[in-house]
């Protein structure tokens, strides 16, 4: 197996693990794919592909999916990011994303 094959296999494994994590969290929260997808900036069809390990979201889209779609705290969003092979949320990013989420929640009341 060459270096490319090893990297490709590792990426496929990360995609599958991330998909399982997202699906398990969504089911535990009793959220539909439509609800999570729409809140996180995806269609339900794309979320299904991510949950099945067929697609890897960008780091930014994964943050949105975790913060807004699944309503996760920073610690759990970081678990998703690490599983996907991305860097953790910085303090500035956490302030930005969670401030936007709070203002969105307030506007819905």
Image: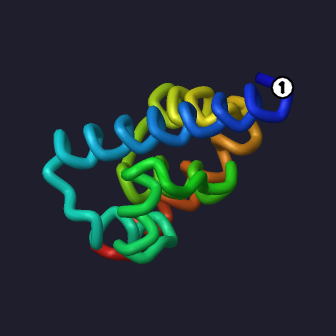
* 106 lies left or right of 63: left
Task: Measuring from the top left, give residue 13's x and y in whole percent.
Answer: 54, 32
Residue 74 visible in this rendered orientation of the protein: yes
| Left or right of 63, for residue 21 | left
Q: Tell me the residue at 38%/51% (across/down).
A: 51
Q: In the picture shown, does residue 35 fall above or below 88? A: below
Is 105 on the left-hand or right-hand side of 13? left
Q: Is residue 90 visible?
A: no
Q: Quadrant of residue 104?
A: bottom left
Height in image: 97 above or below 75?
below
**Residue at the far right in the pictured view:** 3
Location of residue 22 with respect to 32 vertically, above or below: above
Q: Residues within 10 Å of mark 1 (few under 14, many from 20)?
A: few
Residue 62: x, y in percent?
57, 51
Q: Residue at x 83, y 25 (%)?
A: 2
Q: Residue 20: percent from the left, percent from the top?
A: 35, 38
User: Closest to the observer: 2 or 69?
Assistant: 2
Please name the residue shown 38% across and 74% down the image.
Answer: 45
Give residue 105's quadrant in the image. bottom left
Closer to the camera in the image, 97 or 21: 21
- Quadrant where the N terminus lies? top right
Q: How is the image coloured?
A: rainbow
What residue would you read off at disc 1? Answer: 2
The spot of residue 59 in percent (x, y) is 68, 49
Residue ID at (38%, 52%):
52
| In-front residue for pair 85/29 | 85
């Amino acid at each position: 197996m060459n270096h490319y094959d090893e990297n490709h296999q590792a990426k496929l494994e990360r995609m599958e693990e991330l998909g399982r994590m997202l699906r398990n969290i969504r089911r535990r929260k009793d959220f539909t794919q439509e609800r999570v997808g729409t809140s996180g900036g995806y269609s339900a069809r794309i979320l299904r592909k991510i949950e099945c390990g067929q697609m890897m979201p960008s780091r930014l889209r994964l943050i949105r999916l975790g913060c807004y779609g699944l309503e996760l705290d920073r610690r759990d969003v970081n678990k998703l990011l690490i599983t996907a092979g991305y860097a953790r949320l910085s303090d500035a990013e956490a302030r930005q994303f969670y401030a936007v989420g709070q203002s969105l929640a307030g506007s819905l009341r």
